Image (spheres, rainbow, N blue to C red):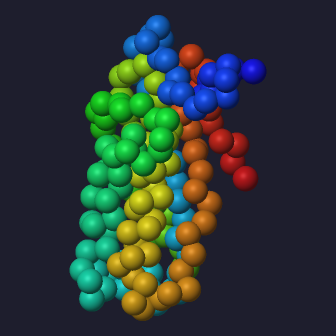
């Protein structure tokens, strides 16, 4: 039985978005990095020996959103119009990477936002692993998406 990503012979295929309307679209995703409080303190103070951890993670997130189609096999190449990256360090032992991606196009940017948040978290891990190998990347999730044929999505607060 054919579906969006498979033809009637069961072969993978890219979804045809040619007939879809061009609309404004946005998505926001997060990834949480749990770490020792001392590691987070070094990041907050800019005292980490590898330098500006959040600055590098921000650039990694932006770069990742623009490369998503190279990483996820059936993703479309999407013109990214804006990427906003923020970090929330309100907890004593966690840093939340939040990535919002916007475009005007025929398909959404959920995968780009999820990829950006994931790569930001991986970059933080990479830069801090020398002082805290027990870090954990958790809760990579889509928070919201707007625009497109399937409608809007807003994750319920838990």
Identity of the residue drawn at 39% across and 40% down: 69
Q: Nearer the viewer, residue 84 or 8?
A: 8
Drawn side of residue 100 relative to residue 48, left or right: right
Tell me: residue 32, above or below residue 157: below
Q: Nearer the viewer, residue 120 or 78?
A: 78
Q: Residue reaching furthest left? A: 51
In the image, is 56 to the left or to the right of 124?
Answer: left
Q: Quadrant of residue 11?
A: top right
User: What count of labels does the image hold?
Assistant: 0
Q: Residue at x 69, y 48 (%)?
A: 157
Give the image location of residue 29, x and y in percent: 51, 48
Identified at 65% across, 42% down, the residue is: 155
Above/below status of 148 relative to 20: below
Q: Estimate the x, y position of residue 81 in percent, counting from the top left.
A: 29, 33
Q: Is any atom of residue 55 visible in this view?
A: yes
Provide residue 92's location: percent of width, then percent of height.
54, 79
Residue closest to the eye, 3 or 89:
3
Residue 42 image offset from top left, x and y in percent: 37, 85
Quadrant position of residue 1: top right
Q: Nearer the viewer, residue 151 or 133?
A: 133
Residue at image position (30%, 30%) is: 79
Compared with 30, 96 (above or below) is below
Q: Quadrant of residue 94?
A: bottom right
Examine the rendering and report whether any part of residue 23 can be seen.
Answer: no
Q: Residue furthest front?
A: 9
């Amino acid at each position: 039985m054919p579906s969006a990503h498979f033809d009637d012979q069961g072969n993978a295929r890219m979804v045809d978005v040619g007939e879809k309307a061009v609309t404004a679209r946005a998505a926001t995703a997060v990834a949480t990095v749990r770490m020792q409080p001392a590691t987070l303190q070094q990041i907050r103070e800019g005292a980490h020996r590898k330098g500006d951890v959040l600055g590098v993670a921000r650039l990694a997130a932006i770069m990742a959103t623009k490369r998503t189609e190279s990483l996820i096999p059936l993703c479309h190449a999407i013109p990214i119009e804006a990427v906003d990256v923020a970090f929330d360090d309100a907890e004593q032992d966690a840093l939340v990477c939040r990535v919002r991606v916007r475009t005007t196009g025929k398909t959404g940017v959920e995968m780009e936002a999820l990829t950006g948040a994931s790569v930001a978290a991986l970059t933080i891990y990479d830069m801090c692993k020398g002082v805290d190998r027990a870090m954990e990347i958790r809760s990579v999730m889509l928070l919201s998406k707007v625009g497109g044929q399937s409608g809007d999505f807003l994750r319920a607060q838990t």
